[in-house]
């Protein structure tokens, strides 16, 4: 068992989660972390991360969490935008195909904007 695993195992015991001494109020934006995940980096990467975390006024762990959270959010937004635009295109296609013959149909151009025929 590695040192990181041993240290993480300490907090798996509920008895080790009881506060000792006077409590410190947590900031509202801080939530309890769910689990310990050991990650290994090259020494030169750790040195750069330490410098960046120091510049941002964060611990190395907090800086890494912030970067990972930002990337997860960025990818979730990109994925939902793609999904939404795909759904919109399919919906407009279905509307166009379902319009009775002879009726004026809404036209969809390359930029996916709707235009009414003149």
Image: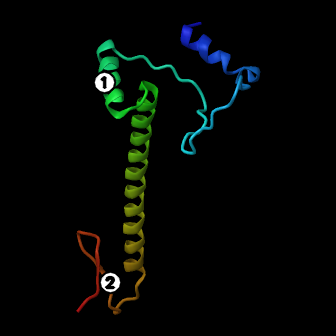
* SS label for mark 2: loop
> Disc count in the image?
2
- The residue located at (39%, 45%) in the rendering is 75
Q: Which residue is mark 1?
A: 51
Give the CA separation, mark 1 to mark 2. Answer: 56 Å
Residue 24 position within the rendered picture, expressed as x and y whole percent measured from the top left: 63, 33
- The residue located at (36%, 67%) in the rendering is 89
Say which of 103 and 2 sits in front: 2
Numbered badge on residue 106: 2
Query: Mark 1 or 2 closer to N-term?
Result: 1
Left of 44 or right of it: where is 25? right
Quarter holding the C terminus is: bottom left
Residue 64 position within the rendered picture, expressed as x and y whole percent measured from the top left: 42, 30
* Farthest front residue in view: 22
Left of 95 or right of it: where is 23? right
Q: Is residue 97 above or below residue 11?
A: below
- The residue located at (38%, 32%) in the rendering is 57
């Amino acid at each position: 068992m590695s040192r990181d695993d041993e240290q993480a195992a300490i907090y798996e015991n509920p008895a080790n989660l009881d506060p000792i001494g006077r409590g410190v109020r947590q900031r509202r934006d801080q939530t309890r972390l769910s689990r310990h995940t050991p990650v290994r980096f090259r020494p030169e990467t750790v040195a750069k991360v330490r410098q960046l975390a120091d510049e941002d006024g964060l611990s190395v762990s907090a800086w890494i969490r912030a970067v990972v959270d930002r990337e997860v959010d960025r990818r979730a937004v990109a994925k939902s935008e793609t999904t939404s635009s795909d759904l919109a295109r399919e919906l407009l296609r279905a509307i166009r195909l379902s319009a009775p013959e002879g009726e004026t149909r809404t036209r969809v151009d390359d930029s996916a904007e709707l235009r009414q025929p003149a």
